[in-house]
Amino acid sequence: MKKKDLENMETPKQASWVIRKIFEARRWLTTGVKELDLYAVKGNYLISKAYTSIMPQYPKVNWKALLLTQGILLRHQFILWMSLHQRLATVDRLSKWGITVHKECVLCMTDTEETHEHLFFECSYSRFIWEQLLKLFGISRQVGRWQEETAWLTTRTKSRNELWKILEVHLQQQYIKYGWKETCEDFNS
């Protein structure tokens, strides 16, 4: 990058993510500044419109109410966020990273590979725990797959009173946390 024209230089392929972001910002600065002038009309500048033009617009997720419920511990929110994005370090993900681990599920002790889908709720052990927790709350329903359970809990969180929101989201977060903790403990032993 030494002695090169940075304005016209392409983003280096081996550049770190920070350098790539700087190069993206450089492109915006050359074109986006003209857009900002549109929001300064008659001496009034609307920062909110300028902000929305700068920030990328991502599609809204339907499960945001699960994470934004008050009274939930931050570490539980983080673990739930990881599970909603399917970023928990399951055996299938560990093996993709080159870490050698036994592929069988440590919860149900079958030869089924431990994946996110299996842990939530194809595994007979985790399904049983979730069914028992639902019974504890007086909820009688057939347990579905992870996406179905998340969608069901999301709709209940939006439509119920605040106490039920906290209890039900906390229920799911505790299920994920302790199910995940048990998986990790069994893996480490």
Image (cartoon, rainbow, N blue to C red):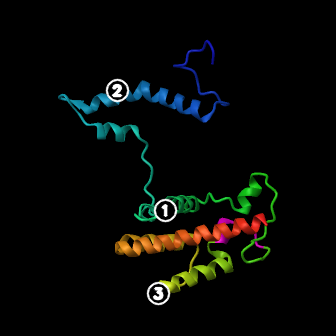
Give the Cα separation between the discs numbered 1 and 2.
44 Å
Q: Mark 3: give few (<14), some (14-19) or many (20+) Cα within 10 Å.
A: few
Q: Which residue is mark 3?
A: 138
Give the Cα separation between the discs numbered 1 and 3.
24 Å
The image quarter containing residue 163 is bottom left
Q: Which mark is residue 141?
A: none
Which numbered mark, 1 or 3, is in the foreground of this view? 1
Q: Which residue is mark 2?
A: 34
Q: Quadrant of the N terminus?
A: top right
Is residue 12 shown above or below 93?
A: above
The single residue placed furthest to the left in the displayed view is: 42
Residue type beneath disc 1: Leu
The span shown in magenta is 112-119
Q: Which residue is rendered at x = 60% and y = 60% of the image?
A: 86
Helix, strand or loop at label 3? It is loop
Q: Which mark is residue 73?
A: 1
Residue type beneath disc 3: Gly
Q: Mark 2: give few (<14), some (14-19) or many (20+) Cα within 10 Å.
A: few
Instruction: Of the two numbered discs 1 and 3 on the same chain, state the one appearing first in sequence.
Output: 1
Which numbered mark, 1 or 2, is in the foreground of this view? 1
